[in-house]
Amino acid sequence: MSRVPRRVVHVLTVADSLVFVDEVVRRSKARGFEVTVVTSPDERLAAFGRRQGVATVALDMPRRVTPLGDWQALRRLHALLRSLQPGVVHAHTPKGGLLGTLAAEAAGVPVRLYHMRGLPFVTLKGPMRALMQTTERVSCRAATRVVCQSPSLRRTALERRLVAPERCEVILKGSNGVDCDGRFQPARQAESGRALRASLGIPPDDLVVGFVGRLVRDKGVPELVLAFERIASTRPKAWLLLAGPYEPRDPIDAQTRRRIESHPRIRTLGFVSDPGPVYAAADVVALPSHREGFPNVPLEAAAMERPVLSTRVDGCTDAVEDGVTGTLVGVEDVGALTAALDLYAADPDLRRRHGLAGRARVEADFRRDRIAEAVVDLYEREMLRV
């Protein structure tokens, strides 16, 4: 029997990422773990703690590279871990992973998990690319185990020699999993989807291309807007629905933003806490990302029986089965993106087949409860190794 304390601390850079650990925290508690969650200050962190009945700590961790700020955050996090003496630290996202694993190593935490959810450096250039790649190696070295969010991300991590193969794994088939029987159950969201269309002035029989995510360059928003403009010129009943905030980090160009705001059949919603109605309102969901780890959006959309149009990058190739649950195109390939959108627009039966296949795949391989249980199994297994 392991004598490692049944105490786990999650370290995440921002409260936006709490969705990653929601079910894991719930199931950890049910199996006797004491849980503490750390993010940068945000009212959502306190709300998460109240809802889950767990301790939370607000600790400023700037997402950008700030040597002084990062050093101060590392010192505070180290002091916190020395005080809590957890058996497990589960560190997520690049900045949270770096600070969390280093602080945990310095504090003598026996089980240190780095959850690699994506590799930002793959779309960077010059000194920043080298710096970000180095920080990934440091996080992997300080961890006792690296969890890769998808099989394709694990392959890239091994190819870049970020971590040794025997020290990293994928939980089941990857992803955070999807709540198939709750938020992303098509019948439950059907009426909310119709209501959203009506509120936006979109006729019930028109075609809606949905997008859920940050409105930034790396999500392929400029290419999506261009592709939509092309199909909209010949399909007067096509609409583009964008759900997500504009962000100053990796912003879209001013021309793309003007196109979004001036097009009569593009609708923006800003940040949405529940994307279910957006998927329900859409006929096809597009996520033409430049990089991912294992995005939630394609699986959530698939659970809602929507076909998904995405790109051949890490994570998206795991989330979308090309030609079965959706379509994959090349990164920044506006022509291929346009052709795929036009194909879905012209073929309702294809949309239905891909949507049904997507739902069946999510139910078989990506149920959130199973993945969360497997994460807690990993905690138990790693504790026994100490």
Image (cartoon, rainbow, N blue to C red):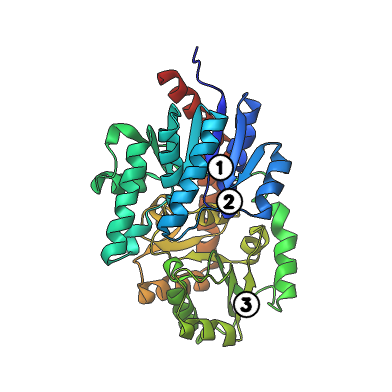
209 or 58: nearer the eye?
Answer: 58
- Mark 1 vs mark 3, CA separation in Å: 31 Å
**Residue count near mark 3 (Cα–Cα under 10 Å), binned few <14, some 14–19, many ≥20:** some
Does the residue at mark 3 contact the one at mark 2 (Cβ under 8 Å)?
A: no
Residue visible at 42% across and 75% down in the picture: 223
| Residue 251, above or below 167 | below
Q: Amino acid at mark 1?
A: Glu
Q: Can the viewer see residue 325? A: no
Does the residue at mark 1 contact the one at mark 2 (Cβ under 8 Å)?
A: yes
Q: Which quadrant of the view contains residue 190?
A: bottom right
Q: Amino acid at mark 3?
A: Arg
Q: Can the viewer see residue 385? A: yes
Residue visible at 32% across and 62% down in the picture: 128
Give the residue at mark 1: 363
- Mark 1 vs mark 2, CA separation in Å: 8 Å
**At numbered mark 3, what does the secondary structure look like: helix, strand or loop?**
strand
Residue visible at 70% across and 53% down in the picture: 187
The reply, left or right, for residue 80 in relation to residue 323 is right
Image quarter (top left, top right, bottom left or bottom right) of the C terminus: top left
| Residue 35, above or below 218 | above
**Residue count near mark 2 (Cα–Cα under 10 Å), binned few <14, some 14–19, many ≥20:** many
Indicate which disc residue 267 carries: 3
Q: Amino acid at mark 2?
A: Ala
